[in-house]
């Protein structure tokens, strides 16, 4: 089950890491709670690309947040809070 989503942060300029105060280094993201109580985090998603339906693509890789170029950050964690994973 999807428990948290952020979409709407713009991408950073290509191949450039902006060293500034970032409110949330994850940028656009989706957090999914699994049946066993673990959580998955999909972060640095392209602005406006998040889609949440069973069987659909979730999002496209982008580079918002603390990211220098488009990539997918996939993290499995045992808490909803990604800083405690």
Image (cartoon, rainbow, N blue to C red):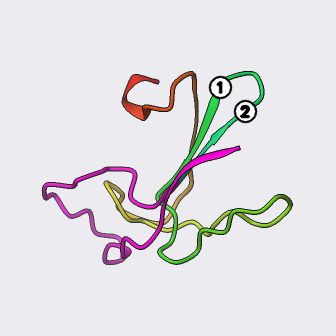
Residue depicted at 80% across the width and 66% down the height: 56
- Quadrant of res 3: top right
Say which quarter of the image contains residue 57: bottom right
Mark 1 lies on a secondary structure that is: loop
Q: Residue 9 in magenta?
A: yes
**Residue picked out by circle 1:** 38
The percent position of residue 6, horizontal first and vertical second, equals: 46, 60
Q: Which residue is mark 2?
A: 34
Neighbourhood count class around disc 2 (C-alpha, 10 Å): few under 14, some 14–19, many 20 upward: some
Report the magenta residues as a range: 1-29
Q: Mark 1 and 2 residues: CB-CB less than 8 Å, in contact?
A: yes
Name the residue located 47 percent from the left edge and 68 percent from the top edge.
Answer: 7
Using residue 40 as the reference point, say whether residue 80 is left or right of it: left
* On-image quarter of the N terminus: top right
Relative vertical location of residue 39 with respect to residue 26 in this rendering, above or below:
above
Q: Main secondary structure of the magenta part?
A: loop
């Amino acid at each position: 089950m999807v428990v948290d989503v952020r979409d709407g942060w713009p991408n950073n300029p290509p191949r450039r890491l902006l060293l500034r105060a970032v409110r949330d280094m994850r940028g656009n993201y989706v957090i999914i709670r699994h049946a066993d109580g673990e959580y998955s985090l999909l972060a640095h998603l392209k602005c406006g690309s998040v889609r949440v339906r069973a069987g659909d693509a979730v999002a496209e890789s982008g580079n918002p947040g603390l990211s220098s170029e488009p990539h997918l950050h996939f993290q499995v964690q045992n808490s909803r809070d990604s800083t405690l994973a």
